[in-house]
Amino acid sequence: MTSASTAQSPSADPATTVEVTGEPSPTPDPAAPRADGGGAAAVIRRRFATVDARADRFSWLATAVVVAIAAILRFVDLSRIKGKIFDETYYAKDGYGLISRGVEWNYKDNVPSYVVHPPLGKWLIGLGEWAFGYQDADSKVSVPGHLITTSPEFGWRFSAAVIGTLSVLLLVRIGRRMFRSTVLGCAAGLLLALDGFHLVLSRTALLDIFLLFFVLAAFGALVLDRDARRRRWARALDDGLDPSQPGRAGRPPTGWRTWPWWRLAAGVLIGCACAVKWSAVYFVPVFALLVILWEVGVRRSAGVRRPWRDTALDELPWLVLAGVLMVLTYLASWSGWLLTDDGYYRSASSTAYPTGSLSDAPVIGPLINLFEYHRAAYGFHAQLDDAHKYQSWPWQWLLLGRPVAFHYSGDGVCGAPSCASEILLLGTPLLWWSFLPALVALVWLGVARRDWRAGAILLSVAAGILPWFVLALDGRTMFSFYAAPVLPFLVLAVVYVLGALIAPAGGDVGEMAALTPGDPGYERRLVGSVAAGAYVLLVGLCFAYFYPIFVGKVIPYSDWLARMWLDGRWI
């Protein structure tokens, strides 16, 4: 993936070799500066080329259309189902406790709540309750919103809908930057917007949509960091840098303006992801590996003699700093617990919770207690093996082997003797059943093209799925929504394959040069475009068919049963 060599098709022109970054190099421009004249050669210019996303108004207009579709689907009738469904019974209450007391609080018994997930996702849920009001009959709590008072369900589901919509925006822009194609970027966002799994998580007050968002945002920041570092090298080469020189003389100029700000932002964002659910930590080593491989690749392309050594010297300190920011961000999410005395495990002097290893020492005491709290929570997760009706195994997730029913009711009027209303956490079947073939194709295309994008997508999918296979060996209770942070990368895998269908034979995925009848590759482009468009259309139709069981619409029981394609596995 980061080899210095170039790959060349037997039929390709020597000037169009493909470097390990997967970016085809064009025929050198006679007007471009020559490498031996102090400027970057045209072939290196192409390898270091990035997308200027700010100047393309059409791309932002297309992005706005896709995001508007996502927002409409996620906000319309958001409070249709009344009351707390599935795990909203925990997270909606925890969110209100955080915004009212700074810690998760059991208002029914007036004691701190023992929780086993970090607080950031619940803080975000609580923001919606603060803005639009909150009610809980069991706890006898009813408070108006600070902005406007709406139904309480809208309040605790609002933040999830916002974050779900923003994740579609992120995927459009990340896809456009990776594939250098507005069409493919918008296709990625549209497929995510039309996925039932993503829609259900965006309309319920659970933590997983927030986890998905922050993991995707961290990945997007790393892609921006990759582009920024390549532009830095390109400018230095244009200014006459000789990368074969030892030491600082062979490296681009330094200064605070050239610091890897996006990499540091990624550290903050992955810290936010860990502050939603600990499972985000599985992405940390993979993201760090991607940074190292990309930095080695850019140095090899530039002609650095010892790219691995220079990468270690130049970039590892920045990775360490990003790690420090990740930890500090995670600790900051516990600020309500740290700065008050009300939280569970917070004080050793209380008789309400374990006191054996807790401390009331200033400064260090809260950190010791927080560590003990984490150790207890980890013990809970490690021993979680109780049978559950909707539990599933990692090898079932992409096959939709056991979706989770968030809500079901036989009440309501539907014009038939028997009715049904369900919210089923089910991915749009046609899209999800495309994931495994797309991953297989991605392995083939990635190896054949030595494409950094294929490697980044595959490694990210592995980070989010493979650890659960290991944990499954211990019989851990698992659910399909554990796969949520992988979903955007699976969609990128599908879009990569669609881009390969559209691209000219041997050309770069995302290459959209205008072709006319008679041009080489015109027929391939035409057939590939029709196939890709038909696929997206069929996904949309499949989504529309299942839409009633994504949002809890009351339909005849016979219509509901017809949508249970895998019979008992979906019921």
Image (cartoon, rainbow, N blue to C red):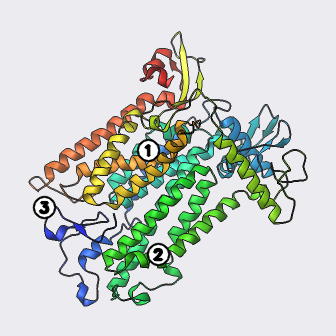
Say if 253 sits above or below 349 in the image: below
User: What residue is rendered at 48% in x and 20% in y?
Assistant: 568
The furthest residue to the front: 474
Residue at coordinates 82% horizontally, 34% vertically from top-left?
140
- Which circle's residue, 3 or 1, is located before the other in the chain? 3
Disc 3 target residue: 10
User: Residue 29's quadrant in the figure?
Assistant: bottom left
Name which residue type carries label 2. Answer: Ala
In the rendered structure, which amino acid carries the disc numbered 1?
Leu
For discs 3 and 1, the disc positioned in front in the rendered view: 3
According to the picture, the residue beneath numbered tag 2 turns out to be: 312
Location of residue 147 in the rendering, given as x and y in whole percent from the top left corner: 71, 49
Q: Classify residue 459 by image quadrant.
A: bottom left
Mark 2 or 3: the one toward you: 2
The picture places residue 262, in percent across and down from the top left corner, at: 51, 68
Q: Which mark is residue 538?
A: none
Observer-nearest of 52 and 463: 463
- Left or right: residue 277 compared with residue 485: right
Task: Check the image and name the residue furthest to the left.
Answer: 518
Classed neighbour count for the residue bearing mark 2: other residues with Cα under 10 Å, few (<14), some (14–19), many (≥20): some
Q: Is 204 displayed left or right of 359 in the figure?
A: left
Residue lying at 40% horizontally and 64% vertically, measured from the top left: 53
Identify the mark at residue 192; answer none if there is no mark.
Answer: 1
Circle 1: is it few (<14), some (14-19), or many (20+) Cα within 10 Å?
Answer: many
